[in-house]
């Protein structure tokens, strides 16, 4: 492949999630080459680069100034997303950010406008909706397997990341919380199936004012039991009205000790579907049509070997071929608008009409092997 047909990618932020991204990007998509990584802690960048031959460790400033890098992947903490992504755009680079794209809809709109003014693109996680499980789910719904869909329920229920994450403090700071952290997996899935959302209502509570680190394998011994101050709501119920006329409920909670509630349920005029965790590229689908006596289990008909990074590969290919891409900044902005509006509704007690919308991402063809998008 000619060099002009390859997008050079640099990754900023060499924390826990970085290796997951790199493992699913390096050497898999022939039109994309990851060439560099950086971090505020330069030893972290060197340690990460050592695990992937050909990857150059840099400082953040060096990576942003490097003219050979076309696209920056922003894997920093949520509070840093806006400033770093803006810096990358001003350096003339396309940007793909971990979620959330920014902390507010206003910041997201500024980033998208800045990119457009410079002829650049902005993309954002999560891209799990491009995995085999959700793509199969999208195919079934769009092809009318359960008739006209009128209701979608999403349930993300567990007891918080402090049990296993050694740096869980940022999860309980603005930009964190169960809705902002896990809501995008569900909302991107909903939008891929049903299109944008028109109006929301919300209710929210904060289970406890503090949390304590657990004794998971990644928690340092001296940190076990140390308190974390909670600055965000930790149990949020959102009622959703889709532009299509369907309704939905999204519950995200870090206050639940146990549940048997399905992650996703979809109900239509001719049947129902149950789906597993959308924070996955695989997933089992259970389908029960109107006259069925039992659930039918369906396995994915799309690639499940992909992982974090397929959205970046799609974005890189779209830039090279001047086409729309799926994990777009417009969809990320709409998702932030939905989540922010749910919290605003919870605070005011009134329904909120969204001011944004987004294109519906194009489904992937079935049966594609890893490393292919068409």
Image (tube, grey):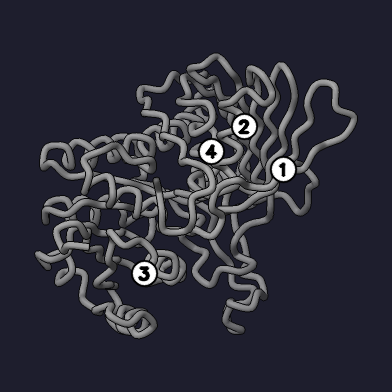
Q: Which residue is mark 2?
A: 140
Marks 1 and 2, how far apart at CA:
10 Å
Question: Does residue 13 sit above or below 297 in this rendering?
Answer: below
Residue count near mark 4 (Cα–Cα under 10 Å), binned few <14, some 14–19, many ≥20: many
Q: Which residue is mark 3?
A: 26
Identify the mark nearer the N-term, 3 or 2.
3
Q: Which residue is mark 4?
A: 189
Q: SS class of the residue under badge 1?
A: strand
Residue under the image location 66 percent in, 71 percent down: 214
Q: Which residue is mark 1?
A: 298
Residue under the image location 44 percent in, 18 percent down: 353
> Which disc number belongs to residue 4?
none
| Relative side of 205 to 188, left or right | right
Image location (x, y in percent) of residue 163: 64, 67
Identify the mark nearer the N-term, 4 or 3.
3
Tag in front: 4 or 1: 1
Q: SS class of the residue under badge 4?
A: helix
């Amino acid at each position: 492949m000619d060099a002009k047909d390859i997008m050079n990618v640099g990754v900023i932020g060499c924390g826990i999630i970085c290796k997951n991204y790199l493992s699913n990007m390096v050497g898999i998509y022939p039109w994309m080459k990851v060439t560099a990584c950086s971090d505020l802690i330069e030893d972290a960048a060197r340690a990460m680069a050592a695990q992937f031959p050909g990857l150059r460790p840099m400082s953040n400033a060096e990576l942003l100034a490097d003219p050979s890098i076309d696209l920056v992947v922003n894997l920093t903490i949520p509070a840093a997303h806006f400033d770093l992504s803006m810096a990358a755009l001003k350096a003339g680079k396309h940007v793909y950010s971990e979620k959330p794209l920014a902390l507010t809809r206003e910041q997201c709109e500024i980033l998208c406008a800045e990119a457009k003014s410079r002829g650049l693109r902005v993309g954002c996680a999560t891209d799990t909706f491009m995995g085999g499980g959700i793509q199969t789910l999208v195919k079934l719904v769009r092809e009318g397997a359960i008739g006209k869909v009128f209701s979608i329920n999403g349930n993300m229920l567990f007891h918080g990341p402090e049990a296993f994450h050694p740096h869980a403090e940022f999860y309980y700071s603005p930009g964190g919380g169960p809705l902002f952290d896990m809501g995008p997996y569900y909302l991107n899935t909903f939008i891929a199936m049903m299109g944008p959302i028109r109006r929301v209502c919300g209710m929210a509570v904060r289970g406890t004012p503090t949390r304590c680190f657990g004794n998971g394998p990644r928690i340092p011994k001296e940190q076990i039991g140390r308190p974390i101050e909670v600055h965000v709501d930790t149990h949020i119920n959102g009622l959703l009205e889709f532009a299509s006329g369907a309704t939905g409920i999204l519950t995200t909670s870090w206050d639940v000790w146990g549940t048997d509630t399905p992650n996703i349920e979809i109900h239509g005029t001719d049947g129902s579907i149950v789906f597993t965790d959308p924070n996955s590229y695989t997933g089992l689908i259970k389908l029960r049509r109107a006259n069925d006596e039992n659930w039918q289990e369906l396995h994915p008909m799309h690639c499940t070997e992909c992982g974090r990074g397929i959205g970046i590969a799609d974005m890189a290919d779209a830039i090279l071929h001047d086409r729309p891409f799926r994990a777009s900044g417009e969809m990320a902005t709409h998702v932030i608008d939905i989540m922010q509006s749910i919290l605003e509704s919870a605070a005011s007690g009134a329904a909120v009409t969204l001011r944004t919308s987004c294109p519906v991402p194009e489904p992937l063809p079935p049966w594609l092997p890893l490393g292919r998008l068409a």
